[in-house]
Amino acid sequence: MKSILEYKDYRLYIQDYYDERKRLGAFSWREFCSKAGFSSPNFLKLVCLGESRLGKPKIENVAKAMGLVGFEKDYFRELVTFGNAKKDSVKKAALLEMAKIASEHRVRVVDGEAFQYYESWKYPVLRELAPMMPGANPRDMAEECKEYVSAEEVRDILNFLVKAGFLKKDGDKIYSQTEQNVVGSNEALPIAIRSMHREMARMAVRAVDRYSVKERYFTGVTLSVNEKASHRIIKEIESCCKKVLDIANEYGDSDRVSRINFQFFPFTDKVKEPRHA
């Protein structure tokens, strides 16, 4: 399923979401509507058929049911506003906001090539490194990497990145990125992304002893939380990640590739009842 940023019709997006879920496994309009908080088992189907429309109070519920968060949820909200608006002024305002969100989050959603792209740190690292080294051959790039990668692997990976559309070849040994950021959809890529998380976590462990404190920054805190606090912390991490990307994108003279891991996970099970001595 393509990125929500490519849609201008919220009904089509909802229909495509439903079709994709249906293709991946058992899923019904009844289940979809129930998850979004509607008592009618076919309301969203009627919306997609143009026989009803999604009201403003239910936008958040439907977005949540489809797993939309952050800028994707914001874009969906404007998408619905645009689709339901009667006045040209309202349509124009929503369309401008959609364009702004799409511009700020120039994203390529990887699907078919996801497992190969996410199978190793080498793919995202070389996608960032290649544009920094115009004219460099694969051996030059391999020697710049802290972790081992052969010149032959670099050549094969660069060919894949160009073929899959992650990089564009502008000349002999000159590359540029086709989009700024790469993300994967929540439905299609969980296995591939989990694999990348595991590999990056192992690399972070090695970095503790491998690099001096001047080259790396590690910190952490152990804390007690409840469900509400957990959700707020996750949203704060997502916001922080966006800010970090924004900062990196401000500069056009990058000279190295780095990685940030945001990790938040439970140390214990939920304590069901307070324990007294």
Image (spheres, rainbow, N blue to C red):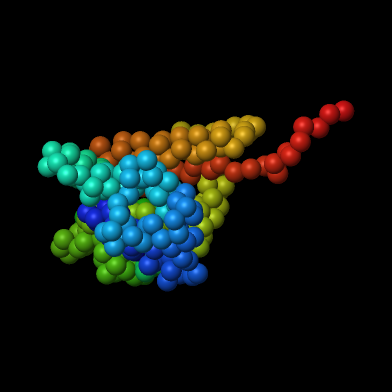
Q: Residue at the far top: name it.
A: 277
Foreground: 74 or 222? Answer: 74
Q: State which quarter of the image contains the C terminus.
A: top right
Residue drawn at 13 percent across, 38 percent down? 89
The spot of residue 75 in percent (x, y) is 29, 46
**Can residue 35 be spotted in the picture?**
yes
Residue drawn at 55 percent across, 52 percent down? 202
Report whether 1 appears left or right of 29.
left
Foreground: 276 or 239? Answer: 276
Foreground: 210 or 101? Answer: 101
Q: In the rendered image of this protein, does residue 157 appear above or below residue 76?
A: below
**Can residue 137 be spotted in the picture?**
no
In the figure, residue 156 lies in which quadrant? Answer: bottom left
Q: State which quarter of the image contains the N terminus.
A: bottom left
The spot of residue 226 in percent (x, y) is 62, 34
Residue drawn at 54 percent across, 55 percent down? 198
Foreground: 65 or 211? Answer: 65
Number of residue marks? 0
In the figure, residue 66 lies in which quadrant? Answer: bottom left
In the figure, residue 166 lies in which quadrant? Answer: bottom left
Q: In the rendered image of this protein, does residue 276 appear above or below residue 59?
A: above
Q: In the rendered image of this protein, does residue 166 appear above or below residue 81?
A: below
